[in-house]
Image: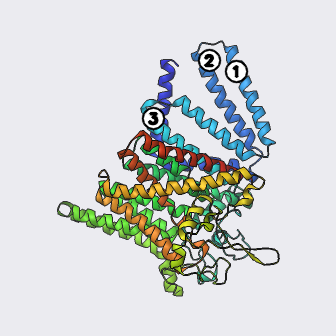
């Protein structure tokens, strides 16, 4: 590669990262938006023009690359044309094979991996090593999430979803979206009467507007418009990973101390299956993660602009789902510490910032529950109730017994256990009862993945078993790393430790309180704890940064890489077999 090519590639790399660094979330949204009309969030809704369009893009890219290479190598024009024709022919054959394949999701994943690897090797610059390596890891994670979205329909592996019915009022998250789409206003009666209408409307309103855009403005079918909603949740999940990266960088993690935690987060199954959830979890956690990041930045440099970002993240997070309020106490703790720390020199400025914070955050976060309280006497902390006689009820088992029972039978099967009924309505199996064991299982497999997803693939069941225990090892390592960091690491100051530690404790404590108050299998779900993946990965990174040794690095690198590879394999297979 000559100096001209080197400088050209360097300039391109520099421009790309400059744009991405300035507007990372907008760039991520732009990618999701561009992919939407090509796939509409489902491999089954892919338009017939998608393959020709992508083929044209790849042929054009290959032609430009080959032409420039031949020109710089001073090869004859005839050679360049021959190479371009050969590449076009190979790509055309690949497109033909893809169109007739029963494994199109696998094809997309492999082609995406090759494309990312090609771009990485072509434009890589040592000066931007951290950016390139991090972007490559996050890019592969995004590709995996996208493939999972393509193989997961709006009715597959969802939570309380219902159906998008514009002819009558129906419950579930899709029913809520359909009501907003059809009526352009909130439900005007006591929302406790309709399943899942108790949630604040930010996520459901955005989804209703998204369906209106594609269906009413761009005239695609309702099925395509509804399936494409997963492109929104894909963006939310990818935004969480982006925020996690900036949190890791906030603590100045570099090298393996950065890449290993980032790999854990990018390939963690909870953010893979979250990308296809059509409920309000993805948007809520994206905004909560944003609140954590903006609070850390505000702590270093308190400003009105910074605190407004926090207020919007928390307020809008609560407007998506009230559980976002769990981040408020740790944030308030940081506010109090900074107020005491800087009282002498800037108490007036800080007081003004706090007033502005409250003026934005409180109305955004509380208007919906206050509306319910005033109009229908709905408690501010109302939770959607479930019948006590459901098969998943475990109320007959005392809570103390549940949290102390670690009998081996519970992990004989690595997938989540539920009581189920056969065609004669006879009960079989048993319910999970221990919250810790249950969240370890559904953190990597969710509620809905099981043996049927790997029918006729016994080797995959063995891989799933290894994968589960790798997840347990990494979770234990993260907890130990948290304890070690809290008591020995001075690169993280006391306020930062209190902030992250309090947030972690509130999330875990909230899950255990819900498990006690609402004794159902569904309350013991890792989707209520997803940010703990980020905090755990952060503490592992902090330990690598402080206690760097080849043996220690190998002990965490090997299971992390194995976990990531198995995660990709399992979720591609699940997506392909849906």
Instruction: Tell me if I can see residue 188 in this picture.
Output: no
Mark 2 lies on residue: 70
Q: In x, y percent, where is residue 416?
A: 64, 66
Picture disc at residue 546: none
Front disc: 3 or 2: 3
Picture disc at residue 83: 1
Q: Secondary structure at mark 2?
A: helix
Circle count: 3
Q: Reading the chain from its start, which is encountered first: label 3 or label 1?
A: 1
Identify the residue at horizontal 70%, vertical 39% (top origin): 54
Q: Secondary structure at mark 3?
A: helix
Q: Is residue 423 above or below residue 477?
A: below
**Residue 338 position by quadrant:** bottom left
| Colour treatment of the image | rainbow
Mark 3 lies on residue: 129
Q: Secondary structure at mark 1?
A: helix
Q: Reading the chain from its start, which is encountered first: label 3 or label 2?
A: 2
Identify the residue at horizontal 62%, vertical 39% (top origin): 113
The reply to whether discs 3 and 2 touch (Cβ–Cβ < 8 Å) is: no
Spatial CA distance of label 2 from label 1 is 9 Å
The reply to whether discs 3 and 1 touch (Cβ–Cβ < 8 Å) is: no
Spatial CA distance of label 3 from label 1 is 31 Å
């Amino acid at each position: 590669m000559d100096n001209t090519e080197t400088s050209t590639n360097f300039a391109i790399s520099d421009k790309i990262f400059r744009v991405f660094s300035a507007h990372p979330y907008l760039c991520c949204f732009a990618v999701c938006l561009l992919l939407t009309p090509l796939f509409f969030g489902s491999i089954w809704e892919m338009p017939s023009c998608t393959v020709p369009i992508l083929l044209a893009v790849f042929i054009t890219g290959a032609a430009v690359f080959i032409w420039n290479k031949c020109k710089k190598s001073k090869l004859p024009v005839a050679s360049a044309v021959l190479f371009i024709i050969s590449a076009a022919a190979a790509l055309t054959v690949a497109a033909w094979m893809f169109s007739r394949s029963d494994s199109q999701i696998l094809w997309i994943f492999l082609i995406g991996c090759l494309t990312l690897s090609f771009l990485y090797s072509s434009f890589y610059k040592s000066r931007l090593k951290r950016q390139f390596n991090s972007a490559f890891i996050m890019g592969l994670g995004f590709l995996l999430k996208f493939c999972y979205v393509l193989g997961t329909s709006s009715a597959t592996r969802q939570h309380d979803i219902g159906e998008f019915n514009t002819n009558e009022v129906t419950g579930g998250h899709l029913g809520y979206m359909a009501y907003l789409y059809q009526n352009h206003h909130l439900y005007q009666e006591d929302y406790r009467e309709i399943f899942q209408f108790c949630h604040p409307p930010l996520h459901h309103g955005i989804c209703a507007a998204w369906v209106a855009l594609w269906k009413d403005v761009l005239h695609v079918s309702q099925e395509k418009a509804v399936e494409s909603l997963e492109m929104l949740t894909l963006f939310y999940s990818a935004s969480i990973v982006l925020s996690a990266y900036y949190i890791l960088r906030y603590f100045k993690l570099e090298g393996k101390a950065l890449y290993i935690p980032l790999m854990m987060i990018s390939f963690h199954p909870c953010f893979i299956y979250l990308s296809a959830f059509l409920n309000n979890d993805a948007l809520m956690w994206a905004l909560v993660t944003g609140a954590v990041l903006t609070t850390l930045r505000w702590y270093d440099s308190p400003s009105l602009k910074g605190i407004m970002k926090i207020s919007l993240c928390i307020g809008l997070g609560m407007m998506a789902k009230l559980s976002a309020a769990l981040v408020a106490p740790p944030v308030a703790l940081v506010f109090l510490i900074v107020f005491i720390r800087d009282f002498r020199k800037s108490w007036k400025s800080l007081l003004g910032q706090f007033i502005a914070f409250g003026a934005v955050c409180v109305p955004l976060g509380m208007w919906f529950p206050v509306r319910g309280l005033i109009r229908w006497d709905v408690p501010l902390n109302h939770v959607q109730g479930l019948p006590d006689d459901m098969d998943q009820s475990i109320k007959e088992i005392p809570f103390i017994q549940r949290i102390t029972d670690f009998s081996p039978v519970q992990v004989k099967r690595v997938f989540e256990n539920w009581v189920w009924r056969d065609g004669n309505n006879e009960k079989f199996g048993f319910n999970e009862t221990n919250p810790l064991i249950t969240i370890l299982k559904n953190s990597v497999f969710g509620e809905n993945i099981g043996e049927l997803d790997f029918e006729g693939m016994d080797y995959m069941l063995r891989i799933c078993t290894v994968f589960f225990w790798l997840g347990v090892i990494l979770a234990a390592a993260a907890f130990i790393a948290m304890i070690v960091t809290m008591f020995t690491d001075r690169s993280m100051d006391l306020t930062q430790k209190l902030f992250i530690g309090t947030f972690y404790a509130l999330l875990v404590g909230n899950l255990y309180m819900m498990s006690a108050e609402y004794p159902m299998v569904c309350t013991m779900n890792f989707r209520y704890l997803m940010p703990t993946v980020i905090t755990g990965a952060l503490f592992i990174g902090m330990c690598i940064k402080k206690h760097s040794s080849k043996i220690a690095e190998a002990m965490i690198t090997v299971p992390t890489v194995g976990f990531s590879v198995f995660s990709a394999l399992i979720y591609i297979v699940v997506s392909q077999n849906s």
